Amino acid sequence: MEPELTPSAAPSSAASSGPSPDRRVQLLAALEGVRPRLVEIADWIWSHPELGNREHGAAALLVEEARRRGFTVRTGVAGLATSFEAHRRVGRGGLRVGFLAEYDALPSLGHACGHNLIGAASLGAALALAEMEPAPDLDLFIYGTPAEETTGGKVNMADAGLFDHLDVAMICHPGYQNSIGGTSLATHPIQIEFFGRPAHAAAAPERGINALDALLFTFNALKAIKQHLRDDVRLPGIVVKGGEAPNIVPEYACGQFSVRAADVDYLENVVLAKVRAIAEAAALATGATVKYHHYENLYCEMRNNMALAAAFKANLESLGEQVNVLPPHQRGGSTDVGNVSHRVPTIHPHVAIGPATLRGHTAEFATAAGGPGGHKGMWNAAAAMALTTLELSGNPDLLTRVRSEFRATFPAAATAKA
């Protein structure tokens, strides 16, 4: 999901020296060699949009190409039918880098978030590094991660420990600008159900317990508490079920809410506690009973590793692109990449595929994702990720900065990885 982010004049981290000129030429030549195939793959996925957890064609296409290029592939990882993990050791092995591939589409709009380009770019970065001669010393991983737009396959995969062995993880999202930094909102999708008792709404309403009243009480109370929560909190919701007929007291009512905040700790310990308390108060006030559960995975906020992001910025700029640096607090939507970033040093930059007026989840964005602008952005993303990997593998100081930043941000996760 592309966040709506505003550029900042804030400087990036320490400057990147980049790979040596000879190695850079070799890498970009290798990427040029696979460019036609990457375009074919991106366009096929764009022309065959598949919703989350149904991306059988896209996943099979990426798996087939990875195997053809010498990667060992496991499919269906973390219990997800359209997920995969591909691994290839090049040179003597060494730095373990994971490239995250997405490929799910949106209902009606198709690839209006450009995930066809994400899958192809992540594949391309890994293939270019694997095709270099002489090969760098790397362990390359490509992860097929289903359903970013809905259930969040990366959450299942992170919970299964699939990323914990990595030194770094990268993914690059198409957008209206080249940018690094920023963040996303943590989200807890909660379903609240109320159970009452039916009765004739005109002849004997006193015999009923109105489950819809409890749900509407919840909606109104959530609006009231918003002023007592931080400004970053979001409490959108819908009525999924509100009754059968107006002359029957509703026996059952169901609402779904996408509760969000800037960080997962505040979300779970403060916001969700208030939401549950309101639902229980609504049940008590109306005589209904209440149940709640999260109907999709919980997304953590994105924590970009800025030492790694600064290297990506320099490498993308070396391709002739201008890159904006976003303030760390600048946020937009939510993404399951956030959960990966809490387990391993991760970046989630954006690359431009169209003009500054372009916005995700629109028909115009879908058109761009299937055209020349999309192809250019895909190549830029693959090249910048591959160049950053090559630099990281030969620059111990950069790797130390990446690891130090991660330890400072997530001391418990860093200790577990040690």
Image (cartoon, rainbow, N blue to C red):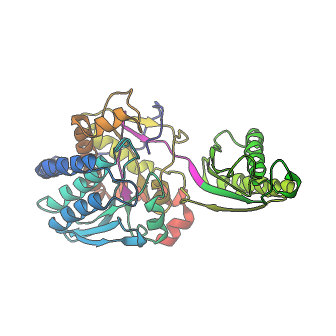
Give me the residue at 37% from left, 27% from top.
Answer: 356
Is 162 placed above or below 359 here? below
Give me the residue at 79% from left, 60% from top.
Answer: 197
Q: Camera-side residue: 1 or 291?
A: 291
Q: Where is residue 139? Give x, y as percent.
A: 27, 67
Q: Is residue 177 magenta?
A: yes
Q: Where is residue 81? Give x, y as percent.
A: 37, 68
Q: In the rendered image, is residue 5 in sight? A: yes
Left or right? Give the position of 209 relative to 51. Answer: right
Q: In which quarter of the image is the N terminus?
A: top left
Start-end of magenta stretch: 169-188
Q: In the rendered image, is residue 418 in sight? A: no
Give me the residue at 85% from left, 52% from top.
Answer: 205
Q: Where is residue 278? Give x, y as percent.
A: 78, 52
Left or right? Give the position of 316 relative to 292. Answer: left
Q: Is residue 140 magenta?
A: no
Left or right? Give the position of 387 relative to 309. Answer: left
Q: Camera-side residue: 9 or 188?
A: 188
From this viewpoint, which residue is outermost toward the right?
206
Give me the residue at 28% from left, 45% from top.
Answer: 381
Is 33 placed above or below 84 here? above
